[in-house]
Amino acid sequence: MRMGLAIDASCDLSQEFLQKHRIAIMPITVRVDSEVFMDDRKPAEIQRFIDRRLGSRSHSAETEPCPVEEVQKLFLEKLVLEQDCVFCLTITATRSPINEHVNKASFAILKNYRQVREKAGVPGPFMMRVVDTGNVFTGAAPAVYEAARLIAANESPSTIRERLVHIASHSYGYMLPRDLIHLRNRIKKRGDRSVSLLSAVVGTALDIKPILRCFRGETSPVGKVRGFDQGAEALFGYVTRRVRAGLMVPVVCVSYGGDLEVLPHLPGYIELRQACAECGVELMEAPMSITGMVNVGEGAVTVGFAAEEHEAEF
């Protein structure tokens, strides 16, 4: 059975990994004033967004997840011909309607795929399985990474789906913003009250950064530090300890809202890299999606991994 993967563009993974596993991308349209960007994880478009230096304006951006019709088109014109089963993984349904869009699209896809495959001379049935990763950005990476591993091992669709649901419920996504005012303005636009104006102003004045965590669809602050470098050191140090304690999936994914060459210069990153190498864990570096930079801010860091349930220690 031919099995494949599809993700939405805000799931942060490296371009090398996406190409190796031929992962299909459901794009997100981002509008900043009169400018339009197609967030499809292509490096050139991400770089174009960074080069435009839209940090001061992007908190007011409008994002439009891949609509139902475009999901149907992607599957019926491409994926139902190339695969017999596709696992479609999305960021948490609590933060984006993309999961709802994919589920709605699945009805038409499963209704119409037979005639498409018959016309192309492709025999047999087609299946699609939609999985809510319960996370955002790099927090979605462990489930996608595990899906690719299980597909390569030729596991059954039922076994893969059960495992992915389990990994999703044990995936952690951490975020360290660089610009607290941007973050506050962005979440206010989304109707979120997790960062107040007062805390944003005071935090900016004192250079206090929150460390945010997404777990099982809920995002909240789990720590605060003074200064971005101190925040990076605290976050990477924490992840280093989790790596040495043991992960459920042998990958840590780090994304950065800018040039990835910055990462090795952040405090604590070299120690994290060393711990991953010693423990047989892949340290995947990924450019942050345009959607991620719009929501968390340029220059932000996110980290994702899967582990047994535990309390954050900052």
Image (cartoon, grey):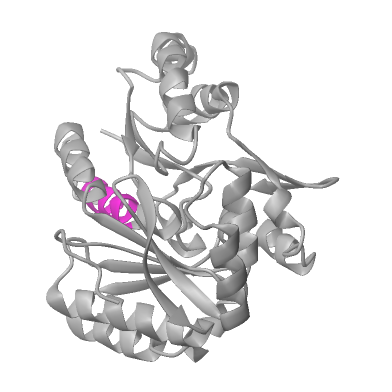
Along the horizontal axis of the image, is 164 left or right of 233? left
From the top left corner, tell me how far across and down residue 212 is, in percent: 41, 63
Q: Which residue occupies 21% across, 86% down?
A: 278
Q: Does 22 lie within the magenta span?
A: no
- Front residue of 152 and 283: 283
Residue 300 drawn above or below residue 61: below
At 28% across and 78% down in the image, what residue appears? 238
Q: Is residue 69 visible?
A: yes
Residue shown at 32% from the left, 69% from the top: 252
The answer to whether residue 141 is above or below residue 223 is above
Q: Position of residue 146 (x, y in %)?
A: 25, 53
Where are the magenta residues, as a range?
142-151
Q: Is residue 84 above or below residue 162?
A: above
Tell me where residue 233 sits by quadrant.
bottom left
How far from the left and from the top, in percent, is residue 148? 30, 51
Q: Residue at x 25, y 68 (%)?
A: 312
- Quadrant of the drawing holding the C terminus: bottom left
Please identify the dominant SS of the magenta region. Answer: helix
